[in-house]
Image: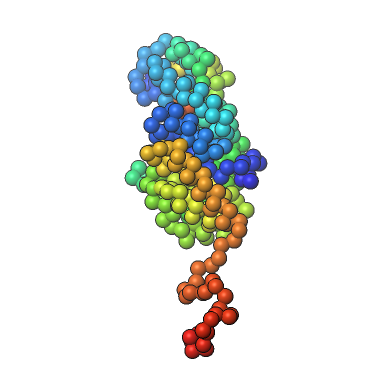
C-alpha cells in the first residue's frame, strides 16, 4: 500500500505503526509519531493499524528558537 | 531567582539552539551565556540522515533544561499534536506554545493560541505561550491556565527591540505576579537590559546570539546586560524629569548670589 510518510509517498506492507518504525530502522531511535494529524504514543504504535493513504509523521529533536 | 512552574533558575537568559554556524559554536554560546534553559524543536526525521539522533546527543550533553517549541504550527490542532509529540520526545511537560498567524511577521494567532493553551493545560502541560503584548489575550491565556507569559518585543529574528515599550510596561504592571519573559525581536544587549529594567523576569534569545560574528562573546554580552538590567530593576530606577536638577549640592556654592538662582 501507499502511505504519505513525512509528506512523501512511501510504499510499505507494514501492518501497523510500530512495524513501520522498525522497518525504517527507528526501533531504538528517539522519535515521536502522529497518524492523520493525531499524536500516537510510543506504547500505542503496535495497536495503530496502517491503511492506504494514511498520513504518517515521524519526528525527532531539532534546533529551535 | 527565576521561578517557572515550580523550578528555580539563577540565569534569566533562555537560549534558542538554531542558526549557529556550527554545533561547536552552539555549545560555546550556551556555556558563555550561563543559560539553564534551551529551546528546541521537532522536525521530520529521515530514515537515511537520522539528523535528530545526533542533535539530541549534543543537547543532552549541554546539561540544560529543555523547552520544546511548536514552531511553524498554523492551527491549534497542529500545535496540540506537536506538543504531545514533544512531551514524549523530550520527556517534559514544558511547552513553548507557538501558533503562527502570518508568515511575514510570524505573529502569534492569539485565538488559536488561547484555544491550544486551554487544551494543553487540561492535559497536564506547563504552557509557556509565545504571545504579543496584547493585554486581553494575556488575560485569556492566564484564565486558560498559563502561569508564565512570553510576549514578543518585535517579530522573530527582526532585531528591532522593544517596539511597543509602553504596552510591555502596562503588561508588567497588570500581571505583577506572573513570570513574564520577553521572547523574540531582541537585537542588542541594550534591548535585553531595557526589558529587564522594566521588570521582566527573563529574556529568550536566539538569532541575536547565533548570528553574531562571535556567538560566544555575544552570549556573554547578553548575559551581563540581562544581569545589569535585573540589578537596576531591583535597585529601583529614578524617574525621568523634564528639567535639570543639580547633582552637586547648591548650598555653599562659592560666589553664589541670589540673582544667579533665578
Quadrant of residue B232 in the image? bottom right
Residue situated in front as seen by the camera: B244 or B121 = B244
Q: Position of residue B171 (x, y in %)?
A: 53, 57
Q: Is residue B192 above or below residue B60?
A: below
**What's the residue at 48%, 15% (across, down)?**
A26
Residue at (50%, 52%) from the top-left corner? Answer: B193
* B180 shown above or below B35: below
Q: Residue at x 61, y 56 (%)?
A: B234
Q: Which residue ends up furthest to the right in the rendered image?
A: B6
Relative image position of residue B145 (x, y in whole percent): 60, 46
Left or right: A9 as drawn, with respect to A48: left
Question: Looking at the picture, how far across and down is residue B110, in whole percent?
Answer: 46, 48
- Residue B207 is situated, as x and y percent measured from the top left of the image, at 41, 40
Snapshot colouring: rainbow
Q: Is residue B260 above or below residue B199?
A: below
Observer able to see residue B75: no
Quarter-wise, where is residue B124 in the image?
Answer: top right
Q: Which residue is at 45% across, 37% downward?
A: B216
Quadrant occupied by the C terminus of chain A:
top left
Number of marks in picture: 0
Nearest the eye: B42 or B232 = B232
For the residue pair B17 and B237, the one nearer the viewer reads as B237
Q: Visible in this render: residue B62?
A: yes
Outermost residue toward the bottom in this view: B259
Q: Which image quadrant: the N terminus of chain A?
A: top left
Amino acid at each position: 500500500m501507499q502511505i504519505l510518510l513525512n509528506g512523501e509517498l512511501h510504499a510499505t506492507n507494514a501492518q501497523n505503526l510500530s512495524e513501520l518504525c522498525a522497518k525504517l530502522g527507528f526501533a531504538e531511535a528517539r522519535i515521536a509519531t502522529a497518524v492523520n494529524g493525531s499524536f500516537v504514543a510510543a506504547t500505542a504504535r503496535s495497536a495503530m493499524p496502517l491503511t492506504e493513504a494514511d498520513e504518517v509523521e515521524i519526528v525527532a529533536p531539532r534546533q529551535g528558537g | 531567582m527565576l521561578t517557572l512552574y515550580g523550578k528555580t533558575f539563577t540565569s534569566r537568559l533562555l537560549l534558542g539552539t538554531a542558526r549557529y554556524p556550527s554545533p561547536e559554536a552552539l555549545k560555546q554560546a550556551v556555556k558563555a551565556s550561563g543559560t539553564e534553559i534551551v529551546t528546541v524543536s521537532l522536525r521530520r526525521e529521515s530514515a537515511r540522515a537520522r539528523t535528530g539522533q545526533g542533535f539530541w546527543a549534543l543537547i543532552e550533553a549541554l546539561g540544560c533544561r529543555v523547552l520544546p517549541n511548536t514552531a511553524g504550527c498554523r492551527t491549534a490542532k497542529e500545535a496540540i499534536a506537536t506538543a504531545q509529540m514533544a512531551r514524549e520526545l523530550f520527556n517534559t511537560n514544558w511547552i513553548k506554545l507557538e501558533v503562527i498567524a502570518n508568515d511575514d511577521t510570524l505573529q502569534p494567532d492569539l485565538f488559536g493560541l488561547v484555544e491550544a493553551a486551554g487544551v494543553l493545560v487540561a492535559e497536564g502541560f506547563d504552557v509557556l505561550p509565545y504571545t504579543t503584548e496584547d493585554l486581553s489575550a494575556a488575560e485569556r491565556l492566564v484564565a486558560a491556565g498559563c502561569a508564565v507569559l512570553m510576549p514578543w518585543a518585535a517579530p522573530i529574528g527582526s532585531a528591532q527591540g522593544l517596539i511597543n515599550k509602553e504596552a510591555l510596561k502596562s503588561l508588567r504592571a497588570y500581571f505583577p505576579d506572573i513570570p513574564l519573559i520577553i521572547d523574540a525581536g531582541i537585537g542588542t544587549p541594550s534591548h535585553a537590559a531595557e526589558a529587564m529594567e522594566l521588570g521582566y523576569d527573563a529574556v529568550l534569545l536566539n538569532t541575536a546570539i547565533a548570528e553574531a560574528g562571535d556567538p560566544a562573546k555575544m552570549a556573554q554580552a547578553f548575559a551581563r546586560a540581562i544581569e545589569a538590567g535585573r540589578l537596576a530593576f531591583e535597585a529601583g530606577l529614578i524617574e525621568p524629569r523634564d528639567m535639570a536638577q543639580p547633582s552637586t549640592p547648591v548650598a555653599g556654592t562659592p560666589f553664589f548670589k541670589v540673582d544667579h538662582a533665578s
